[in-house]
Image (cartoon, rainbow, N blue to C red):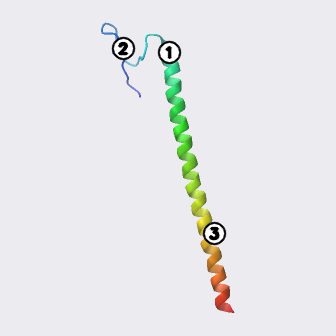
Amino acid sequence: MFVYKNWNSAVLESKNAYVGGDAYNYIINAGLATAWFVLAGVCAIIGLAFVVARYLNEEELHKEEIVEDSEVDE
């Protein structure tokens, strides 16, 4: 993503250029950056879902322990 070449031009230095115009390259890079941000957001949401699921699971286990302790006391 950081070093890319346009193989259409043999004469000009085409490092970090997809197409000839800078504006087109900005548009392409904006699309790539958006894709990376979306991917990071999806991963963050999935990670948060795992954290919430673990918290809820621990709460359920804690409730079961309280019920078992109260049954033993009776």
Residue 36 at x, y percent in the picture = 50, 34
Q: Kindly give the residue lying farthest to the top in the view shown.
A: 11
- In depth, the one of 22 and 68 nearer the eye is 68
**What is the CA distance from the residue labelled 2 to the residue labelled 3?**
58 Å
Give the residue type at disc 3: Glu
Which residue position holds label 1? 24
Residue 29 at x, y percent in the picture = 49, 23
Give the residue type at disc 1: Tyr
- From the image, which quarter does the C terminus lie in? bottom right
Q: Residues within 10 Å of mark 1 (few under 14, many from 20)?
A: few
Q: Kindly give the residue lying farthest to the left in the view shown.
A: 10
Q: Residue at x 41, y 27 (%)?
A: 2
Q: Residue at x 66, y 88 (%)?
A: 71
Residue 15 at x, y percent in the picture = 36, 17
Q: Judging from the image, what secondary structure is the residue with disc 3 in?
A: helix
Quadrant of residue 1 within the rendered picture: top left
Give the residue type at disc 2: Ser
**Image: 70 above or below 46:** below
Which residue position holds label 2? 14
Labels 2 and 3: the sequence-earlier one = 2
Q: Residue at x 51, y 19 (%)?
A: 26
**What is the CA distance from the residue labelled 1 to the residue labelled 3?**
53 Å
Residue 49 at x, y percent in the picture = 58, 54
For residue 3, which numbered disc appears in the image?
none
**25 relative position to 5: left or right:** right
**Image: 33 above or below 44:** above
Which residue position holds label 3? 59
Q: Residue at x 52, y 32 (%)?
A: 35
Q: Are marks 2 and 1 in contact (CB under 8 Å)?
A: no
